[in-house]
Amino acid sequence: MTGSLRMLVVEDNPPELRLFQEVVRQAEIRCTLMIATNGEQALEAASGKGIYSGSPRPNLILLDYNMPGMDGGEVLRALKDDAYTRSIPVIMFSSSRSQADIHRAYDLHANCDIAKPFDLDGMLEVVKSIQNFWTLTAQLPK
């Protein structure tokens, strides 16, 4: 693996978050996982504020669209409006298949939109694809 993957996962659903974490372990993906369970935490984690003060900045964000309070679109807009976090690639990783949500994500400068699988095999395939692309093909900001 080239570089160090520091992935911020923004997910408000505990079972889906546990599934993701288990898949990362099973796939033996070498990365630092940061977890945020709502939009406000996501913005703090990305900018190194609050409880994330002193933490390294993530270089990839997986962002759920449907969250209570600040939704993924609002978080994405705030990330891309901030000069400090603008260059962090954001993957919208959501169960929403709404074309309106997909168009909104790209309009707000998401780097891609991936349908979130809900079974172990599907999640494993997606997580490996994300890891392969973002660590072997793409160059992430340091």
Image (spheres, rainbow, N blue to C red):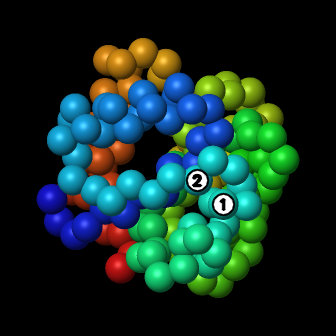
Between 58 and 91, the one nearer to me in the picture = 58
Q: CA distance from mark 2 to mark 1?
A: 5 Å
Q: Are marks 2 and 1 in contact (CB under 8 Å)?
A: yes
Taking depth in this image into account, of 1 and 68 the one nearest to the observer is 68
* Residue of label 1: 41
- Amino acid tagged 2: Ala
Measured along the vertical axis of the image, is residue 24 above or below residue 119?
below
Which quadrant of the figure has residue 40? bottom right
Q: Secondary structure at mark 1?
A: helix
Inspect this view and state whether residue 86 appears. Answer: no
Q: In this picture, is 131 found above or below 57? A: above
Quadrant in which residue 99 is drawn: top right
Residue 113 shows in this picture: yes
Q: Looking at the image, tell me whether mark 2 or mark 1 is earlier in sequence order.
A: 2
Q: Is residue 65 left or right of residue 48?
A: right
> Residue at image x 17%, y 65%?
2
Q: How many marks?
A: 2
Q: Position of residue 106 (x, y in %)?
A: 67, 51
Residue located beneath label 2 in the image: 36
Q: Residues within 10 Å of mark 2 (few under 14, many from 20)?
A: many
In this rendered view, identify the residue nearer to me: 10 or 86: 10
The percent coordinates of residue 49 (x first, y second) are 62, 78
What is the quadrant of residue 59 in the picture? bottom left
Which labelled disc corresponds to residue 133? none
Q: Quadrant of the N terminus?
A: bottom left
Q: Secondary structure at mark 2?
A: strand
In the image, taking residue 113 as reference, residue 134 lies left or right, namely: left
Q: Amino acid at mark 1?
A: Gln
